[in-house]
Amino acid sequence: MNAPFPPAEARRALIERHATLIEAAIKAVSARAAWSPFKDSPSTKIHGPDKPVAGKAAFEAQLNRPFDLDLPGVIDRVGAEVSPFTGEALGITYPRCDPEALIEAAQTAWPDWRAADPELRLALCAEMAMRLYDANFEMAQAVMHVAGQSYTQAFSGSGPNALDRGIEALAYAAKAMRDVTRSARYERDFAGEAVSLDKTYVLVPRGIGLVICCASFPTWNAYPALFASLATGNPVILKPHPIAVLPMAIVARECRRVLADFGFDPNLITLAVDTLAEPVAQVLVDHPAVQIVDFTGSPRYGGHLERTVTGKLLFTETAGVNTVVVESVADLDAAARAVARAASLFSAQMCTSPQVVYVAPALAEAFAAALVAQIDAIAEDPALAAGIMGAVQGEVSLKAVADVRGAVERRPGVRVLREAAPYAHPQFPQARTLTPLVLGVDGSAPDLYAEEHFGPVLFVVTMEADAAVAEATHLARTKGSISSYLYSTDEAFIDRSTPLYEQAGANLTINLTGAMWINFAAAYSDYHVSGLNPAGNACLADLAFVAARFRIVQRRRPTA
């Protein structure tokens, strides 16, 4: 057996191995074209028959056991995850650590990382992404059974699509750091005296990064935040949601292994597990050593962070009221199918799910009927429903729909176009499922639909098209919007509408039907969240998401 490479040689080889990937990612974010180093289908034709079996076995072997992570300052072990598909507790416990111990460990690990060649840090992040891709069948099972995503969506959306967002952030980190020349000769004449200075520019990381993950899509926002901070030289503490720890525990496990394999302290990445009764996020946010906070989750806590975090970098993605305006359509059924699929995907527990559908009066009855028929076609086919709708993660989403349904009883003029009801999952009879509630309302009831309802509920609002665009963009400005949608065969209407969406910072999809999901956001091509409305202050991903995670310190001296 050959002896292992010494760290220096292994590190050089790693930089060379991932150089092509990083260059391709930089090219992709510049061209905004379709590209990915990953395959987002779980097909055995791509991966072979063994990997899916091994991934499921790895997940099942972890159930009812302690998760093995050698973290600093362990106080006790906690775990409260329950599968939305089986209704049973996963029984996995995780080390809960003293926050101060996590901070101290990160600070101890930091000097070597801070001093490391930025190209090495980029290569190590790329290596982490590749190892996470290798573990993606295990990750898919984990995401399924904590979040409720279907197997296919958990594999693709929380695997390759999420990793693509991470690689995208890595590309911007490379661009930002490479843009800073490391030395320069400055020569100028001052009052007849020639001055020559040698200048050196040093990239200095900001400090510990805290990544606060959401419950429904833990990896999708965590990967770009993790890689953006880590590549620019900052240690990272991952703070998973208490009901969705396992995916981030897998991330911590794989990334820590990479760090150890190449001679770095694995405590550059740690996991801050907490409970609903004793949350730890605010303790870490308030710690002076934490200088970067990435948050994905509720508008309530996100708004609190935006109002109170000062003197630190804060990147947020929360939620909003996503709207569809239907002025006219070339194909009624195709447009209705596109909206129905997006509203049904993951039982509308996505930040891009449409919630309010404005329809011009001449089309309202026909479009509403077609929309309900398309949702019924999904709901009445158990295999199709299982692949699209998955399961409802928590009781909070069921309550959100029930509260809306209860409010309808007291509202004249609101029609129930489709009742919400469970569907029978063909593999998991105990799955928590709910198909969309569809309500028909007029513009006199904005208080009913002008807030985000995190669950499968859809409002069909009859309104003249120009007024609908005005209200939709007002909601984007005041409540936030991550994805907006527009259907029209009238180019003049589109032309006068699009500036309103731009002014509201609302990303807009126009007349999309067919095989591509209208709420699919493509890494390297689509900018996710504009940062210009209350749905979030950051964009995944752009240069601004990365560039301020390090600063530049210079020194200068007369040329020898």
Image (tube, grey):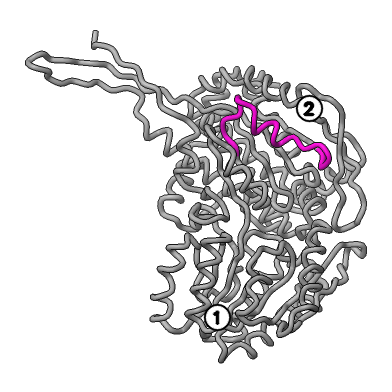
Residue bearing mark 1: 326
Query: In the depicted view, which residue is nearer to us: 405 or 189?
Result: 405
Residue 51 placement, left or right of 204: right
Q: Percent position (x, y) of residue 90?
A: 89, 46
Number of on-image labels: 2
Residue 91 placement, left or right of 12: right
Q: Quadrant of the C terminus?
A: top left
Q: Percent position (x, y) of residue 483?
A: 56, 63
Q: Percent position (x, y) of residue 115?
A: 51, 19
Q: Quadrant of the N terminus?
A: top right
Choose the circle earlier in sequence order: 1 or 2.
2
- Residue 134's tag is none
Query: In the depicted view, which residue is nearer to us: 471 or 447?
Result: 447
Q: Secondary structure at mark 2?
A: strand
178 drawn magenta = no
Residue at x-position 76% and y-position 60%: 150
Residue furthest to the left in view is 192
Q: Can residue 528 be seen by looking at this rendering? A: no
Residue at x-position 81% and y-position 30%: 96
Q: Percent position (x, y) of residue 308?
A: 59, 39
Residue furthest to the top in view is 560
Query: In the depicted view, which residue is nearer to us: 19 or 354?
Result: 354
Disc 1 marks a residue whose amino acid type is Val
Residue bearing mark 2: 97
287 drawn magenta = yes
> Relative to 48, does residue 323 appear above or below in the rendering?
below
- Label 1, residues with CA under 10 Å away: few <14, some 14-19, many ≥20: many
Residue 187 placement, left or right of 61: left
Q: Which residues are magenta?
A: 275-293
> Relative to 168, does residue 491 appear above or below in the rendering?
below
Asked if the residue under mark 2 is in contact with the one under mark 1, i.e. CB atoms within 8 Å, the reply is: no
